[in-house]
Image (cartoon, rainbow, N blue to C red):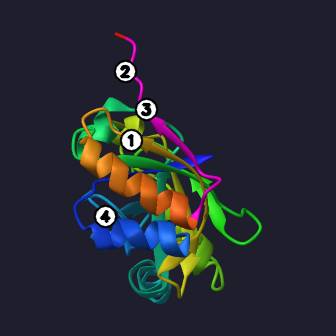
Amino acid sequence: MLYKYRSLDGFKFLSDIFINQRLYAASYFDLNDPMEGHYRYSDGRLTDDLIKKIKDEKERKLKICSLSRDPNNELMWAHYANGHRGVVIGVEIDNQKYDVRPIEYDGPSYVRMAHQNGHLETAMRILSHKLDVWHYEEEERVFVRGENYVHAQIKQVIFGRRMSNQDKSLVKKLVQAVSPDTEILTSRASPV
């Protein structure tokens, strides 16, 4: 199972996740890491045409849905779920339908060579590397091409410890109405 941390701000977007059983996939330049999509290569190893094709894949065609392997990361709760006032949504992604890749936290990807038809794979490889400072996210990325959403089976909803009772009630009713088999939990305190 993979996890999406979400704030309750923009409840319309959160409702869309539950009602339509899908997660939004963004362009790489809409993600929060300013080094996203950067890569290194040796001069002369990539032609200007291939660089343009890789850039086109990254900017126009590929979309990314970022998920985490960890449902109980305090920094993730703070950054993406409004300091435990939001939720974590546990989902299963069809690996036969989508390309799901773990992030490697070793800095920008080094591109040695890209074949004329390998610009899609090269773009996904570039977008599967991040700086080590992000390792706490334990991120896995779902790549889609030409789509804005990733269909997911919602298996679990975890309420933040600081979520109000009113918000818990509202989200619980929504989840039970559209997906009654979904497990609903409350986040546990991290070990000290």
Magenta span main SS: loop
Q: CA distance from mark 1 to mark 3?
A: 11 Å
- Callout 2–callout 1 Cβ contact below 8 Å: no
Q: Disc 1 versus disc 4: distance between alpha carbons?
A: 24 Å
Label 1 CA crowd tier, 10 Å (few <14, some 14–19, many 20+): many
Helix or strand or loop: what does disc 3 sit on? loop
- What residue is at 72 percent from the left and 62 percent from the top? 95
Which badge, 2 or 1, comes first in the chain's sequence?
A: 1
Using the image, determine if residue 76 lies above or below residue 100.
above
- Could you say which is closer to the camera, residue 1 or residue 128? 1
Precedes in sequence: disc 4 or disc 3 = 4
Nearest to N terminus: mark 1 or mark 4: 4
Which three-letter amino acid code belongs to the residue tagged 4? Leu
Label 2, residues with CA under 10 Å away: few <14, some 14-19, many ≥20:
few
| Residue at left offset 39%, top offset 69% | 15
Which one is earlier in the sequence, the residue at label 1 or at label 3? 3
Q: Which residue is mark 4?
A: 31
Nearer mark to the viewer, of 2 and 1: 1
Mark 1 lies on a secondary structure that is strand
The answer, for residue 22, to whether it is visible in the render is: yes
